[in-house]
Each structure stands twice: as C-alpha cells, then as structure tokens.
Image (spheres, helix red, strand yellow):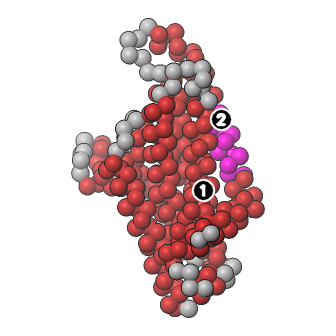
Amino acid sequence: MSTVGLIARNDLRRQFVQPLAWGLLALVCALFAWQFLVAVDAFLLAMPKLAALANAPGVTDLVAMPLLRNASAVLLVIVPLLTMQSLVGERRAQTLPLLLAADVGSLRIVLGKFLGAYAVVALVVVLAVAMPLALAAGTDLDLGRLFTAALGMLLFAATLTAIGIACSAWTTHPALAALATLVIGSVLVMLDVGARLRDVDHALINWLAMSNHLEPFLRGVFDTGAVVYFVVVSTLALLLAARRLDTLHTRG
C-alpha cells in the first residue's frame, strides 16, 4: 500500500476509535431521517392536489432535493468537527515531526489526511442520498437527477474537507481549526448574497460563491465549470496545507 493510503487508513481508523465520528454520524442519521419522513408525509398529503396539475413536481423535487440542500448546510458544521484534529492533533501529540522526518513528503501527508477525513464526510452524503433512493421501488424517482446531485454533494464535501485540512495545518488548536473551517466555508457559501439582493449576476463574486456551483447539480445539470471550481479550490487548499508543513519542517 502507498504511503498516502497508509496515512489515510490510519487516520480513518483513528476517527472511528474515538466516539466523535460515531456520535456525529448517529446525530446526522437521526436528523436526516426526521427531515425525510416529514418531507414524505407532506408529499403524501399534497398528492391529491398535485395530481390535478399538468406539470406537477414529483418526489424528487419535493423530497430528495430539499433533503440534499439541508445536507449541504449540515456539512458546513460536520466537516469542521471531523477535520479539526487532522494535522493540529499530530502537532499537539508531537507525532508530526516524526512524519516529516520520515521523508514521506508534505503533500503525501496532506493527501493521506484528506482521504482519511473525506471517507467519513462522504459517508454523510451517502446517508443523505440513501433515504430518497429507498423510494425508487415504489415511486417515480428521477435517478439521473439524484445521482447528479449526489456527485455535486461529494464535490462540495471534498472542497470543505480540503479547507478543513488547510485550517488544521495553519492553526495551533483544534477549536481554532474548526472555527476557521466553519467561517471560511460559510463565507464561500454566502459570498454573493448581497450581490444577488442587488440583482448582480455573472460577476466574479457570483463565481466565487460555492453555493452557485452546487445548485446546478441539485437541478440535475452536470456543470463542468463547477467541477473545475471545486477541484481548483480543493487543490489550492491542500497545497496551502502542504506548504505549511514544509515551513514547519524547515523550522524544525
């Protein structure tokens, strides 16, 4: 197994040894289940009225997509908690110098930490997608749109995870890393709120807002520009984390 894979596996194992990951997943599952059941109940109550409409929204529009939009907001809170210990925890435990001295390479360490954290974060997306997917056997569910939305959510989650890894590299305390990740993620999501209130579209600030790149996927549109955005932001965050480790290694 590669060095990146070993670091990722060790980090993933460490996540599930501690109660935080289990507790967060249990709470998230309960929250998603409650939102899902409420949405299904509301859809069943509205079915007689929807049947009279020519182009009425279906279960995908009224159950699946609202659940995934809520899941994106949950990720803003969950990801900082799952990534806050990634690198700052190694520094506090005095194990980061051992990794750096092993000549593994800062970028490989960062990628391993990213993959270890992302495996847990991606599980949150899987839980959110699995609930509406369970309705496919008994209703007309738009599977293409659901899987496109799932891809967008995974890209969104990967970007937040990369930002969390970078914040964990640049801070000296897990709480600071979590707070920095939450603030940066929230700012990127809500960056163009003021611009949209002033009917400003297609400006740089609109392109920088992460929510504008997630929305096409939730509408069932595979947006290559959005994929590029998520990949670029994630790459920059991971490179910043690697740069920070290089600086720490140089300073000793």
Q: Relative to 49, is 89 on the left or the right?
A: right
Labelled disc at residue 33: 2
Q: Residue 103: name its quadrant.
A: bottom right
Foreground: 146 or 92? 146
Residue 200 location in percent, x, y?
24, 45
Foreground: 228 or 200? 228
Q: Residues within 10 Å of mark 1 (few under 14, many from 20)?
A: some
Mark 2 / mark 1, whichever is N-terminal: 2
- Label 2 or label 1, whichever lies nearer to me, is 1
Residue 98 location in percent, x, y?
64, 85
Q: What's the magenta bit mostly, secondary-structure-wise?
A: helix
**Residue on which the image places disc 1:** 119
Residue found at x 48% / y 38%: 147
Above or below, comparing residue 88 to residue 41 in the picture: below
Q: Residues within 10 Å of mark 2 (few under 14, many from 20)?
A: some
Q: Amino acid at mark 2?
A: Ala
**What is the span of residues highlighted in magenta in the rendered image?**
23-34
Report helix, strand or loop for mark 2.
helix
Quadrant for the N terminus in the image:
bottom right
Q: Amino acid at mark 1?
A: Ala
Q: CA distance from mark 2 to mark 1?
A: 21 Å
Magenta run includes residue 26: yes
Report helix, strand or loop for mark 1.
helix
